[in-house]
Amino acid sequence: MNVTRAEWAVFFFTIAYAGIFGAWFLSIGNLEFLWYLATMAAMIALVGFNLRKAEFSPALLWALSIWGLAHMAGGGVPVGGSVLYSAVLFPVGGSGELTILKYDQLVHAYGFGTTAWLLWHLMRHNYPGVKWGWTLYVYPALGSMGLGATNEIIEFLAVLGIKDTNVGGYYNTALDLVFNAAGACLAMLVLALASRR
């Protein structure tokens, strides 16, 4: 497979931070994030196997890699007796699990906005008949929300199989789904406005 220098740069950056965080999680016995690293490895392989067929742009690959880094940092960087995921970035409202706006929520919005962008790219690339219709924006947003729900199932499996996870409870899951949807819809809005220009 012919891999460009830009693609190799994203790959080595991703492998570097995954290795560093993997070693860190292993040293502190954080089995939850080792589980997520395995999931991330599967996603990297999926993107890699489809690199030439899908023709992902370097910008999209960087966006995916940065999402992975944000996720690893969220679970691995200690902040105030907890981890970065629990940190309140800007107190909009709520308390406890209903606190908005936390780092976790921002990463969910960014990540599933990026996922919607990826699905948009795949639809545009593989189904040129929908290139200018509303389907090109609605389906990727809905698909991203579905993958966001899949992410919550993966978190649920982590809760069932690993003691002392930092996943959170019902309200956290519901807010994750809300921020997944918000990120997906915002990404499609930005792409729709950009395509009109």
Image (cartoon, rainbow, N blue to C red):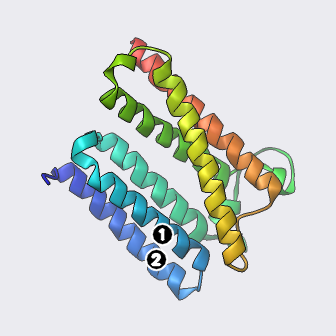
Q: Is residue 132 left or right of residue 145?
A: left
The image shows residue 116 at horizontal and vertical percentages of 49, 37
In this rendering, would 186 be left or right of 81?
left
Identify the residue shown where x is 55% and y is 32%.
141
Q: Nearer the viewer, residue 91 or 148?
A: 148
Query: Which percent across, then down, holds residue 34?
Result: 52, 75
| Quarter holding residue 18 | bottom left
Are the residues flagged by discs 2 and 1 in contact, CB closer than 8 Å?
Answer: yes
Counting from the top left corner in percent of width and height, residue 86 is at 71, 61
Identify the amino acid type marked 2: Gly
Task: Assess disc 1: are there few (<14), some (14-19) or many (≥20) residues with their C-alpha within 10 Å of its C-alpha.
Answer: many
Return the residue at label 1.
37
Residue at 21% from the left image edge and 45% from the top image edge: 52
Please tell me which residue is depicted at 67% across the width and 78% down the height of the picture: 162
Q: Could you say which is closer to the camera, residue 175 or residue 124? A: 124
- Image side of residue 73 versus residue 127, left or right: right
Disc 1 is placed on an element classified as: helix
* Sequence-earlier tag: 2 or 1: 2
Image quadrant assignment for residue 195: top left
Check disc 2 and report the residue beneath it: 22
Amino acid on which disc 1 is placed? Leu
- Left/right placement of residue 115 relative to residue 75 reads left
Spatial separation of the CA atoms under disc 2 and disc 1: 7 Å
Pick the quarter of the image with the C terminus: top left
